[in-house]
C-alpha cells in the first residue's frame, strides 16, 4: 500500500507535470523540495509496481463481482481469486473493493417469532439439527411468494441439509398442496432417497392426510416445526432471503413465466452450481457434494 509520503511525492510530480509549460522543471523541483531525477523517473513510469498490480487485481475483482450479480463481498471474491491462482491477501481485496465502491448487497431482516406449540399430528424430529453427516439424511421444505403483474407466484423448494443444495422446486399461481408435492416429487426422482426425514412448517399443505400418505409411499419421514416459529426451519428461510436479496431485489416481474424462468436460472445455474456458500467453506453445493462423494475402490 502507498504511504502518505509516497502519495505526497506523486501529487507533487503531477503538479510539476501540469505546470511545466509555465515554470521550469528545475525551479519547481527546487521550490517543492523534490529531486529532478525522481520526477523524470516518474514520468517514465507514473504508476508504481504496486499500483499497477492493484489495477490488474481490480480487473479480476470486478469480473468476480459482476459474475456474482453483485452479491459477493471481499471474502467470496478472495476465494474466486485464490481459486484462479492469485496470491493476494483478503485485506487487499477488501481495500480495493472499498476504494472502488464495490459493495455486496445487504440482506433483509428476518422476522422473529416467539416459541410456538408443537404439532399434534407430526412431531418435530429435526429439532434444529441443521448439520447432517451425509446426503439425503434430512431435507427441509418451505414456500414463499414472488410479486408479478399477473399476481402472486408461489415457490416451493426442497433443500438437502447436507450440502444446502436445492434438490427440488416448483412454482405456480396457487398455494395448493400440489405445489409442495411437485417440488418434493422432483427431489425424490432426482435423489432416489429412502428413509429421508423431510422437515416443514405447520402450513396446511403439510398437515393433511394426503401429505402423510405421500411421505409414506415415497419412504420419507415427516417432521414439523412448532407453530409460528420460523427458527425451526431457519435454513429454508435463509435460502429465500438469499434469493430475494441476490436475484429478485424487490422487483415486480411482468409475468409469472418471466419470474419462473429467473428463479430457475438462479437455483439451477447459479445457486446450486457456482454460488459460494459460507456454510460450505466457500464452495457451491454441487462442488461440496462432488468433494464428499464416496470413491469407488479399484477392482484388481
Image (cartoon, rainbow, N blue to C red):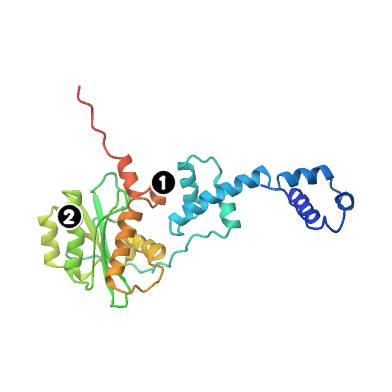
> Mark 1 falls on what kind of element?
loop
Q: Using residue 61 as the reference point, say whether residue 199 is left or right of it.
A: left
Residue 124, percent from left and from top: 24, 59
Q: Using residue 193 as the reference point, say whether residue 16 is left or right of it.
A: right
Q: Residue at x 49, y 45 (%)?
A: 81
Q: Earlier in the sequence, mark 1 or mark 2?
A: 2
Question: Which image quarter: residue 123?
Answer: bottom left
Q: Quadrant of the C terminus?
A: top left
User: Relative to 9, is 141 above or below?
Assistant: below
Instruction: For residue 122, say whether it is visible.
Output: no
Q: Residue at x 17, y 63 (%)?
A: 181
Q: Using residue 184 as the reference point, say whether residue 151 is left or right of it.
A: right
Q: Residue furthest top?
A: 300
User: Relative to 130, is 241 above or below?
Assistant: below
Residue 62, percent from left and from top: 51, 54
In depth, the one of 221 and 30 nearer the eye is: 30
Residue to which mark 1 is pinned: 281
In depth, the one of 103 and 58 nearer the eye is: 58
Q: Using residue 179 as the reference point, say whether residue 236 is left or right of it.
A: right
Residue to which mark 2 is pinned: 221
Question: Which image quarter: residue 128?
Answer: bottom left
Residue 218, percent from left and from top: 12, 54
Q: Residues within 10 Å of mark 1 (few under 14, many from 20)?
A: few
* Viewer-side label of 1, 2: 1
Residue 99, percent from left and from top: 61, 57
Q: Residue at x 30, y 68 (%)?
A: 258
User: Relative to 114, is 31 above or below?
Assistant: above
Label at residue 198:
none
The count of marks equals 2
Residues at badges 1 and 2 in contact (C-beta under 8 Å)? no
Instruction: For residue 31, say whether it is visible.
Output: yes
Amino acid at each position: 500500500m502507498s504511504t502518505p509520503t509516497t502519495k505526497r511525492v506523486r501529487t507533487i510530480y503531477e503538479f510539476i507535470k501540469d505546470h511545466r509549460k509555465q515554470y521550469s522543471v528545475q525551479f519547481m523541483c527546487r521550490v517543492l523540495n523534490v529531486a529532478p531525477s525522481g520526477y523524470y523517473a516518474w514520468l517514465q513510469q507514473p504508476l508504481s509496481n504496486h499500483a499497477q498490480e492493484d489495477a490488474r487485481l481490480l480487473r479480476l475483482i470486478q469480473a468476480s463481482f459482476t459474475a456474482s450479480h453483485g452479491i459477493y463481498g471481499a471474502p467470496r471474491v478472495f476465494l474466486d481469486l485464490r481459486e484462479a491462482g492469485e496470491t493476494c491477501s483478503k485485506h487487499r481485496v477488501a481495500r480495493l473493493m472499498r476504494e472502488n465502491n464495490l459493495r455486496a448487497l445487504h440482506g433483509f431482516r428476518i422476522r422473529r417469532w416467539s416459541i410456538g406449540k408443537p404439532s399434534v399430528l407430526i412431531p418435530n424430529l429435526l429439532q434444529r439439527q441443521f448439520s447432517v453427516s451425509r446426503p439425503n439424511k434430512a431435507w427441509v421444505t418451505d414456500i414463499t411468494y414472488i410479486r408479478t403483474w399477473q399476481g402472486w407466484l408461489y415457490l416451493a423448494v426442497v433443500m438437502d441439509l447436507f450440502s444446502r443444495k436445492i434438490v427440488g422446486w416448483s412454482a405456480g399461481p396457487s398455494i395448493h398442496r400440489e405445489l409442495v408435492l411437485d417440488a418434493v416429487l422432483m427431489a425424490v426422482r432426482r435423489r432416489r432417497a429412502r428413509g429421508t426425514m423431510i422437515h416443514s412448517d405447520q402450513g396446511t399443505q403439510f398437515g393433511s392426510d394426503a401429505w402423510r400418505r405421500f411421505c409414506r409411499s415415497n419412504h420419507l419421514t415427516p417432521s414439523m416445526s412448532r407453530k409460528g416459529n420460523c427458527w425451526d426451519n431457519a435454513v429454508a428461510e435463509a435460502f429465500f432471503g438469499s434469493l430475494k436479496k441476490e436475484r429478485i431485489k424487490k422487483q415486480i416481474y411482468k409475468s409469472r413465466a418471466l419470474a419462473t424462468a429467473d428463479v430457475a436460472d438462479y437455483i439451477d445455474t447459479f445457486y446450486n452450481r457456482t454460488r459460494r456458500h459460507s456454510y460450505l467453506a466457500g464452495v457451491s453445493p454441487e462442488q461440496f457434494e462432488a468433494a464428499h462423494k464416496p470413491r469407488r475402490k479399484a477392482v484388481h
